[in-house]
Amino acid sequence: MTELNLEQIRNFRLHSHHLDAFYTKEDLIAAAGACGMQNSPPGAWETALYNRIPSCSQEDMNHFLYQERCLLQAWSLRGAPVVFPEEESDVFLSALIPQEDEPWIYTHGISLALDFLQMSFEELLPMLKQVMPRLNGKTIVTKSALDQTLAEWMLPLLPEEKKTLWNHPSMYGSPDKQTVGGAVVSFLLRPCAFDGLVVFGAREGISPTFTSYNAWTGHPLGNQGEGAKKLVRKFLHCYGPATPASFEGWLGCSGKQARRMWKAVSEEMEPVKAVGKNAWILSEDKACLMSPKPLQRELLLLGGHDPYLDQRDRSLLQPDKSLHKQIWKMVANPGTVVYRGEIIGIWTSTKKSRGMEMKITLWNGFQDKEKISVLAEEYADFRQQKLIGIEF
C-alpha cells in the first residue's frame, strides 16, 4: 500500500486549494469551486478568495457575486452560507438532498419547536415549500425578517389550534425578535436552499438580503444527477487522503448519507497510508501526491474560516493538540499564520478610526517578522484600510 508523508499531504492540499502559487482572475471559478468558500462570519469568503487571487479586489468580488452572478451564495455545507460557482449549484445544493430515511443537514435542533407544537417535520416542510414561490420577484432584507415573513405566510396553512403556539415567543434565544414559527422556518430554510428555493441576494449595507434561486439566476435549479459524485471528488481532491467519517463531518450530514455518496465514487479511489493511518485518495491524484511540486508561496495569512483550515485531521495542520483550542473555537476563529502548510501562529485584527491594528502570535518554525508584516500590510490594503500597528 502506498505510504504518504506529512510534506506530501500538505503540499497536495495547498495545491488543491490554490494556495501554492499566485492565481489570477481567470482562475476564479476553479478557486471558488474547489470546495466552496464559507461566508460565516460575513466577509470570510472574501478573505479566502483574496488569499488565492490577491489581484481580486473587493469591488471585483462584489461584481462577480452581485452583478455578473457567476458566483452564488446560499446555505450549503453544514448548513452554513457558502459562496460557490453558480454553474455548480447541483454540486453545492441539490447533491445535499437526503434520500429515503436520511435526515436533512442542519435540522437536528428543530426538535424543541416540534415538541412544543406537537407537529412533525414531515408536516411542516411541505407547508413552507408551498409558500416559498412567493419569494419570486421579492427581496427580503435581514434573516430575522425572512424567518418571520415566511412564518406569517405559513400561518393560514396551520391547523387552527396550532396558530397561537406558532406565534408564541421562540425558545431559541431571541424571544423578543423571533416566534416559534420563525424558529421552525429558520431550520427548514436549509432544505429549501438545497431544493433551490432561496438564496442570498446583494447586501444592503451590513444586512443580507434573500430571494428565490429562480429570481436571482433567471432559471430554476437544475439537477443533472452527478452532483453527489462531483462533491465527493471535490472533497477528496481538497482534503485527501481522507475517510468517509471525515467526509461526513465536512458535510455535516448523517453517516448514512455520507456512506451512500462515498460509495458512488468508490471505484475511482484507492487506499493509502497517510502518516501511518488508513485513508483514501482519488486514483487520479496519486501522481500529484507522490511528487509534490516546490511551493511558490510558503507563507500565508489565512482567515479564520478558510477552507484549507476545514481539514478534519487537524493534527496534520498543527501537531501540538494543546494549541487546537486557540485555532478552532466555537465562534470567531482567529486567522492563522501558515508556513509550508503548517499552522505556526494565529492573528487577529481590530478596526480603529485611523486604520487596522493586528496582533500576531507565533509558536514555532518561521520567525521572519518582516515577511509577515508585508503580508499584513497587503491584507489591510485589500480591506481598504491602513495598517497602523502590529503587535507580535
Image: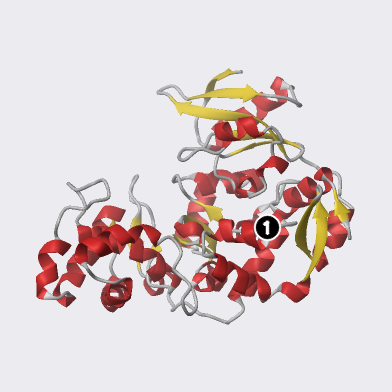
Residue drawn at point x = 63 percent, y = 59 percent = 245
Q: Residue furthest bottom?
A: 224
Compared with 212, 248 (above or below) is above
- Quadrant location of the C terminus in the rendered image: top right
The amino acid sitting under disc 1 is Asp
- Quadrant location of the N terminus in the rendered image: bottom right
Residue 142 visible in the current orientation: no
Locate residue 314: give its quadrant. top right
Locate residue 153: give its quadrant. bottom left
Nearest to the observer: residue 203 or residue 239: 239
- At label 1, counting other C-alpha atoms closer than 10 Å, the crowd grade (few under 14, some 14-19, many 20 or more) is few
Locate residue 164: give its quadrant. bottom left
Q: Secondary structure at mark 1?
A: helix
**Number of marks in the rendered image:** 1
Looking at the picture, how far across and down is residue 200, in whole percent? 40, 60
Nearest to the observer: residue 116 or residue 305: 116
Looking at the picture, how far across and down is residue 221, in whole percent? 47, 77
Compared with 306, 270 (above or below) is below
- Tell me if 268 is positioned left or right of 111 in this view: right
Residue drawn at point x = 28 percent, y = 68 percent = 138
Q: Which residue is mark 1?
A: 27
Residue drawn at point x = 81 percent, y = 47 percent = 275
